[in-house]
Image (cartoon, grey):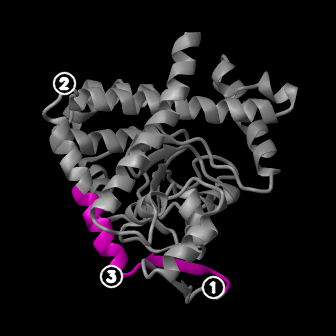
Amino acid sequence: MTNGYLEVISLVERLHRHFLEVVKLELDGLSIHDINNVQGMMLFNIGDAEMTVGELTLRGCYLGSNVSYNVKKMVENGYLVQERSVHDRRSIHVRLTDKGRTLRDRLSGMHRRHIEMLGQTTITEADLQTVVTTLRRLERFWIRASDLVQRPGQFAAWSPEKCRTKDQAASACETRGRYRRSRRMPSLPSLAELAPGLSAAGALGPSDIDALAAYGVRTIVNNRPDNEDPGQLPAAEARRLAEAHGIAYHHIPVTGPTLSRTDVEAFAAVLRSAAQPVVAHCRSGTRSTLLWALTRLDEGADANALIATAAAYGIDIAALPAIAARLG
């Protein structure tokens, strides 16, 4: 385990450097010398979106520490345009210019070539999905490890993963949440990444919505009926808080006994048109995950694979086949 763990860390770093060298060669081949490889990938990751400079880092478009410098250079060289938000004059948004979109399209072509070349190797789509799954698990582990290092000792012992009962886990989550929210940068609630651009979460409070907004979430889908628990944030108030951040808000309340085909279709309709990233939530994340799985079943996905994806996050949807059969 020790050698494998350290080798993965080294490989991730080397792969990143190799990939940036490939991008540099692509730019050289296009005779483009007024933008570097890191900036080129920032453009590719921004795509058609419009976001603040802070969101470039929070949404993973750029992971370095000098984002403002890179934005400044791309604005100077005509790849990005900066504009003040019409809703908050203190906020500066960036988006691609025509020149930026042209380079983005060329980098998309590079990715398509690489995918075609992969088809001529022994690397399969299943291999890539295995790598993605493993790296996502490592990401979650490192996030948790960071929390344990920074959290006082008594909090580490009350990790929800180590609790034997739901009450203990809820208490641990509450304690962890209080500690996280005491930091300057709001911390995200626990998220289960079900698919690219879609995560499931448990109950959300006002501070959780603030944190999701800070990290660039564009859509929230609430699958909880109002008054399910004492002190629960009402959907109308959650909508007000979300929309104040510019987050689209959808309320599709479901319960186990009343879950219907209409609920599944409504959830699927939102996912088809929603701006990403999307966070769907209920009390624990199970109902939201179940709704997602039912929509994927309608698209021909394998039930066992969906159940396994949920189980990787500790979410039990083993009843998925029976529920799907009931709904018809």
Taking the image as shown, residue 220 lies to the left or right of residue 236, namely: left
What range of the chain is rendered magenta? 90-109
On the question of residue 66 being in view, the answer is yes
User: What residue is at 31 percent from the left and 56 percent from the top?
Assistant: 26
Q: CB atoms at circles 3 and 1 under 8 Å apart?
A: no
Q: Callout 2: 10 Å neighbours few (<14), some, many (20+)?
A: few
| Secondary structure beneath label 3 | helix
Q: CB atoms at circles 2 and 1 under 8 Å apart?
A: no
**Which quadrant is home to the C terminus?**
top left
Q: Is residue 92 magenta?
A: yes
User: What residue is at 28 percent from the left and 54 percent from the top?
Assistant: 268
Q: Nearer the viewer, residue 135 or 256?
A: 135
Residue 132 picture location, percent across and down: 38, 33
Label 1 sits on what residue type? Asp
Q: CA distance from mark 2 to mark 1?
A: 51 Å
Residue 4 picture location, percent across and down: 51, 15
Q: Nearer the viewer, residue 234 or 218?
A: 218
Up/down of 87 relative to 107, above or below: below
Label 2 sits on what residue type? Thr
Label 3 sits on what residue type? Asp
Label 3 sits on residue: 98
Q: CA distance from mark 3 to mark 1?
A: 25 Å
Q: Nearer the viewer, residue 31 or 240?
A: 31
Residue 173 picture location, percent across and down: 70, 36
Q: Callout 3: 10 Å neighbours few (<14), some, many (20+)?
A: few
Can you tell which quarter of the image residue 58 is in? Answer: bottom right
| Secondary structure beneath label 1 | loop
Label 2 sits on residue: 122
Residue 146 picture location, percent across and down: 71, 34
Label 1 sits on residue: 88
